Image (cartoon, grey):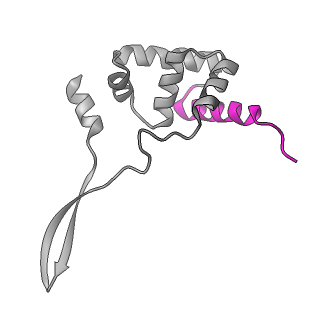
Amino acid sequence: MQRLADFARRRPYVSLATKIDGNVSENSVQLKPILRRDRSILSHDAWKTIAKSLHISDRELEIIQGIFDDRKEFAIADELKISMHTVHTHLERLYRKLGVSSRIALVLCILSEYLSLLPPTL
C-alpha cells in the first residue's frame, strides 16, 4: 500500500536536450502540476452547501474532493488514512445515491448541483 502511495506522489520527469555553445547536454526537468493540493475549484462554504443539499456525509465529501483533484482510489485512501476498499465502497454508494455510474458523471452531478444553488443573475 505504501509503495502505491509513493508512486502516486511522484512527479513526471522529462529529459530535455539543450544546446549550449554548440554542445548538447541532457537535463532532467521536473514538471510541476497545474493544480496544487491547497487549491480547490470550489470554496469551503460551497462544498458544505452542496453536501447539505445532496445529503452527503463529511467522509463522502472528502472522497468527492479527491475525485475533483483527479486522484486515484489508492491516493485518496492514503491521504484519508483508510483502505482502498473503503474508498471504493464509498464511491459505489455515492454513485447509487446520486444516480450516476462514473467519475465524470459524479463530477457533472456535483457541478450541476452547485450551479443550481447559485442565485439567478439578470
Residue at image point 63% right, 35% down: 108
Relative depth, front residue between 4 and 32: 32
Residue at image point 37% right, 15% down: 85
x, y (%) of residue 26? 14, 67
**Horizontally, is 36 left or right of 105 in the view?**
left
Quadrant assignment, res 100: top right
Assess whether residue 106 is covered by the magenta stretch: yes
Where is 33 relative to 109, above or below?
Answer: below
x, y (%) of residue 37? 41, 39
Count of residue discs: 0
Quadrant assignment, res 8: top left
Relative depth, front residue between 122 and 91: 122
**Residue at the front extreme, as displayed:** 45
**Residue at the bottom extreme, as displayed:** 22
Residue at image point 38% right, 21% down: 80
Assess whether residue 111 is covered by the magenta stretch: yes
Please provide the residue range marked out in magenta: 101-122
**Most frequent secondary structure within the magenta stretch:** helix
x, y (%) of residue 41? 56, 41
Where is 82 relative to 15, above or below?
Answer: above
**Residue at the right extreme, as displayed:** 122
x, y (%) of residue 42? 59, 37
Relative depth, front residue between 67 and 53: 53
**Horizontally, is 83 left or right of 44 in the view?**
left
Residue at image point 54% right, 29% down: 102
- Can you say which quadrant of the picture contains the N terminus? top left
